[in-house]
Amino acid sequence: MKFGVSTFLTDEGIGPAALGPALEERGFDALLLAEHSHIPVSRETPYPAGGDLPRIYYRTLDPFVALAAAASVTRELLLGTGIALVVQRDPIHTAKEVASLDLISGGRAVFGVGAGWNREEMRNHGTDPATRGRLMDERIRAIIELWTKDEAEFHGDFVDFDPVNSWPKPVQQPHPPIWVGGNSERAFARVAAYGTAWMPTGVPPKELGALIDRMRATAGDRPSVVVYGAQHDAESLDLYTELGVERALLYLPTRPKDQTLQLLDDLAEAVSAHR
C-alpha cells in the first residue's frame, strides 16, 4: 500500500513549495488538495461533518496554482485535487489547467473529482444543485474530449461547443487518472464510466469493505481504491491492507510550517511498518 497526504492549503498554513519536498523526503507519494472557490456567508447548507464550518474552508488556495508551485520543487510526487468541484468550473479552462499541470510536472497530475455539497456555493457559479450530477458528468466527458482529441467537440444538455483546438495535451496517456469521490451508487456509476480509482471519503475502516463490494458490483475490478482522509492507527492500516486499498491519503491538518513538519514526522512514523 502506498501513502499520500490530503490537506487544505491556505494562506495561514505551510506553503506548497515547502510542503512538496517535505512529503517526498518522508516517503509520501501523493499530495491532494481540497478546493473551495469561496464560502457564502449564508449557512443554509449544513456542514456534512456537523458543527461549525472550519476556518480552512474559507481560505483555501487555488489548487492548480498551489500544485504547480509544488511541482516545481518535486520530482516524483503525484499532484492532485481532492476534490476539484467540477460543477463550479468551466470545463474548457479546467481541461487546460489539468493538462498544463501534467505537462510542467512531467506527467504527475491526478484529477480528483466530486459533485460537492455546498449548495449556496454552487448557485453563485450558476449551478442548480438539483442537476449538479448530470452537469458534472457532462463536464468531465467534455474535458476528456479536450484532452484526447485534436479537434474536440461536445454537444450535451449543459456543455455545448463545436470543434475546437485546445493545447497543451496531457503527458499521461490517454489522459491523467481520474479519481472519483463519493460513496453513493451514483458515484460508483461514475467510477465505472470514467474513473481510474474510487476515492471514498469519511468512511470508517470497518465499513469500507462492504462499500468496496458495492463499488465492485457496479464498476468491476479495474478501478483501484484510494482512501481520502485515511486513518493512520495500526488497526486501520492493517484493515486497509487486507481490503486491497492501493493508496491511503492521510489527512494533514493545516498548520504553520514547523508544526506541519512535526505532524509529517508523526505520520511517517505511524505508517513505517506498512510501507
Image (cartoon, rainbow, N blue to C red):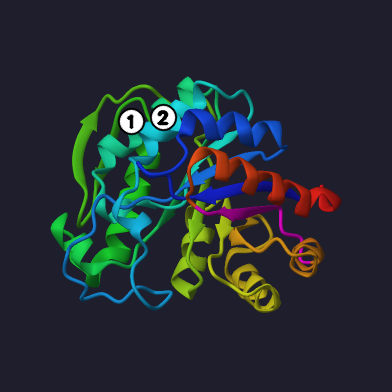
Q: Secondary structure at mark 1?
A: helix
Q: Is residue 251 magenta?
A: yes
Pick the front one: 246 or 33: 33
**x, y percentage for residue 189?**
48, 66
Assess disc 1: are there few (<14), some (14-19) or many (≥20) residues with their C-alpha within 10 Å of its C-alpha.
some
Q: Secondary structure at mark 2?
A: helix
User: Please, is residue 112 above or below residue 68 in the view?
Assistant: below
In the picture of the structure, the residue carrying the numbered disc 2 is 99
**x, y percentage for residue 46?**
30, 77
Amino acid tagged 1: Lys
Q: On the picture, is 12 further left or further right than 193?
A: left
Q: CA distance from mark 2 to mark 1?
A: 5 Å
Verify CB contact (< 8 Å) between mark 2 and mark 1. Answer: yes
In the picture of the structure, the residue carrying the numbered disc 1 is 96
Magenta region: which residues?
243-253
Q: On the picture, is 78 further left or further right than 119?
A: right
Which of the 4 quarters of the picture holds residue 211? bottom right
Residue appearing at x 23%, y 59% in the figure:
39
Question: Which numbered disc covers residue 158?
Answer: none
**x, y percentage for residue 237?**
76, 62
Pick the front one: 208 or 69: 69
